[in-house]
Amino acid sequence: MISDLPSPVRVVIVQPALPMYRVPVFRCLAREAGVELFVVYGTEPSIPNAEAVGFSAGCEPQRLIGLGPKLPFVWQSAQLRYADRRHADVLILSSNSWSLSLPLALLLARRRGVRTIVWGHGYSKNAARWRGAIGQRVRLIADAMLLYSRTVAERYVASGVNAMRVYVAANCLDQQPIQAARRQFLEDPAQLNEFCREQGFHPQVESILYVSRFEVANRVDLLLKAAALLAPKRPWLRV
């Protein structure tokens, strides 16, 4: 599929936003020999955009489309503009079944000789069956799919999709700064003790950590209600 591509390969990634945890991924990809990377990102209220450090990028906001107060559909004109060999050899687009521009961009890229990859979960946990089926058909227009879960990838292959078109990149965090902080605390126990003191931790404290976005769908309210029920029996519990 890539044997006829030039070197360096011009890769354009169009994302709805630029979250901080994606920056190390793009930075590593930009350092790859033979890759010329450009990242296009939009704006989402629930995701603050990080600074693009170590790779070329540009912000092009997407539009929300709908009737009345509901704006369920997304239109990202950059998806169509970069579906052109003047700009990209490979175009990587976010998989979103609410995107009206995605299928058009994939079809346009195919006609213009641009290789395409759709990147995402590969399904929507809140989608109606009809929308899920449409989303799957849209993803199959692309040359390849990059999925977060091996289980989902296996489902696509079991349904008849060529395994050579399905790839897995587990959604994870950059471990380098985490491991650096861990080494620093292990080498300086006094600093670790001071950190625990500042945060109010001590051996009797039981802590529950929530690591995700504060969105209604994540049901943080259940965590708070459960903590309230446990509080009388576990006075040192912290959330």
Image: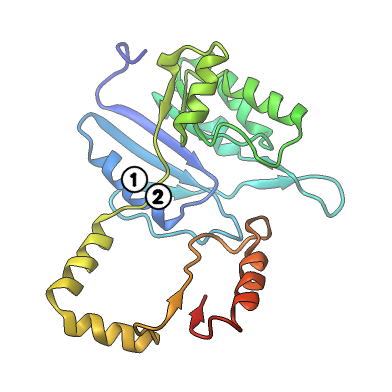
Q: Position of residue 187 (x, y in %)?
A: 12, 73
Measuring 32% from the left and 83% from the top, which residue is drawn there? Answer: 196
Whole-number angstrom distance, CA of label 1 to CA of label 2: 5 Å
State whether residue 86 appears in this view. Answer: no
Q: Looking at this view, name the residue that lies furthest to the left.
A: 187
Measuring 66% from the left and 36% from the top, which residue is drawn there? Answer: 99
- Look at mark 1 in the image and give the residue it sits on: 25
For label 2, the crowd category at 10 Å Cα-Cα, with few meaning under 14, some 14 to 19 and many 20 or more, is: some
State whether residue 228 appears in this view. Answer: yes
For label 1, the crowd category at 10 Å Cα-Cα, with few meaning under 14, some 14 to 19 and many 20 or more, is: few
Q: Position of residue 22 (x, y in %)?
A: 40, 50
Q: In the rendered view, tell whether residue 20 sits above or below residue 155.
A: below
* Image quadrant in which you'd find residue 206: bottom left
Q: In the rendered view, tell whether residue 185 sits above or below residue 78.
A: below
The kind of residue tagged 1 is Val
Measuring 32% from the left and 89% from the top, which residue is drawn there? Answer: 197
Secondary structure at numbered mark 1: helix
- Is 40 left, or right, of 1 in this rendering? right
What is the tally of numbered marks visible in this picture?
Answer: 2
Q: Nearer the viewer, residue 198 or 16?
A: 198
- Is 29 left, or right, of 180 in this rendering? right
- Look at mark 2 in the image and give the residue it sits on: 22
